[in-house]
Image (tube, grey):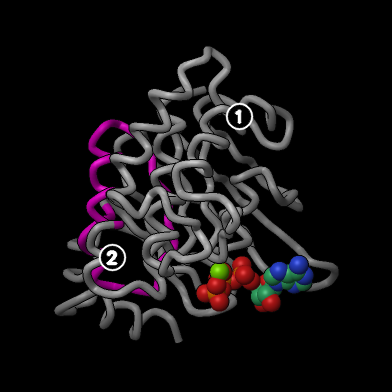
Amino acid sequence: MNENNVVISNLIKKYGNFTAVNDISFSFEKGEVFGLIGPNGSGKTTTLRILSTLLQKTSGEIEIFGFYLPKDGGEVRELISYIPEDAGVYRNLTGREYLKFITGFYNKRGDAGNMTEQGIEISNLKERINDKVDTYSKGMIRRLLIARAIVTNPQLLILDEPTSGLDVVNAKQVRELIKSVSAKGVAVLLSSHNMLEVEFLCRRISLISKGTIVESGTPEELKKKHNAQNIEDVFMEVVK
Ligand SMILES: Nc1ncnc2c1ncn2[C@@H]1O[C@H](COP(=O)(O)OP(=O)(O)OP(=O)(O)O)[C@@H](O)[C@H]1O
Ligand SMILES: [Mg+2]
C-alpha cells in the first residue's frame, strides 16, 4: 500500500465481447502529471472513467492512494475530481452561482464562501463570473470547470482532453492551471491529442493503441529511443 501513488495493474475492460482496454498497467504519484496518449477509440476515456469510479473494470487492480476500486469507491470519490471531455455545467446559473453550488455541496465545514471566492480567482473569469454560464465561450466554461475541480482540493485530478477545442490563449491558461495544481502536490492524469501539450505538461506518458499500451516513458526518453525530434514522430512510429 502506498498513499502517494496511483497504481493500475493489468486493467481490462470489455464492453460485451469487445475489449476496449486490454491489460494495461501504469503508475504515477502525487505531484506528477501523467499523460495517456492514443488515437480515437484507443481506450483513454474508458480508462479515465474507470479510475473515476463511473465505470466498472472487467478485471485488473486499481490502487489509488492505498484505496482499491471498486471496493473503496466512496473513499476514492472523496479524493478525486474528474472532468469529462464533454463536461457540462448548469447553464442557467451564473459562474459565481455554479461555484457556490458546487463548493457548498463539497464543503461540509461551512467554508463554502471562501472556496467560492478561491474558485472565482482560479477561473480568472473576472467580471464575467456574474454572467450566466449560457453566455460563456467553450474556453470560459472549461476554466470554470477546472476551477471547480481544483477548489475542492482533490489529491487526484483526472482530465479528459482538457484543452480540446480551445484557442491558443485559453488552452495556455488551462495548461498553466494544470501545472500549478500539480506543483502543489496533486496527482494529475490526463488524456490528450496534443503532443506539444503533452511534452509541456507530462513528466511521463503512455501511448495507447487499440486498448494496449505500446510505449511508456518520459517524453525525453521516448524521443531518444525513437531518434525522434518530437513526440508526434514517436507517436507516428509506434501507433500504427
Ligand atoms: N459504452 C460503450 N459500449 C460499447 N463500446 C464502447 C462504449 N464506450 C466506448 N466503447 C468503445 O471502446 C473503445 C474505446 O473508447 P474510448 O472512448 O475509451 O476511446 P478514446 O481513446 O477515449 O477515444 P477518443 O480519442 O475518440 O476520445 C471504442 O472502440 C469505443 O467505441
Ligand atoms: Mg475519449
Distance between mark 2 and mark 1 Cα atoms:
28 Å
Q: Residue 49, image x and y in percent? A: 62, 53
Ranked by sequence position, the earlier of labels 2 and 1 is: 1
The image shows residue 35 at horizontal and vertical percentages of 38, 58
Residue at 23% across / 76% down in the picture?
226
- The range drawn in magenta is 174-202
Residue 43 visible:
yes
- What residue does disc 2 label? 170
Q: Quadrant of the C terminus?
A: bottom left
The total of numbered circles placed on residues is 2
Q: Which class describes the residues within 10 Å of circle 1: few (<14), some (14-19), or many (20+)?
A: few
Question: Mark 2: is the Cβ under 8 angstroms from ligand 1?
Answer: no
- Whether residue 188 is in magenta: the answer is yes
Residue 7 as seen in the image, left or right of residue 166:
right
Using residue 90 as the reference point, say whether residue 26 is left or right of it. Answer: left
Q: Is residue 104 left or right of residue 168?
A: right
Which of the four quarters of the rendered structure image does ligand 1 lie in? bottom right
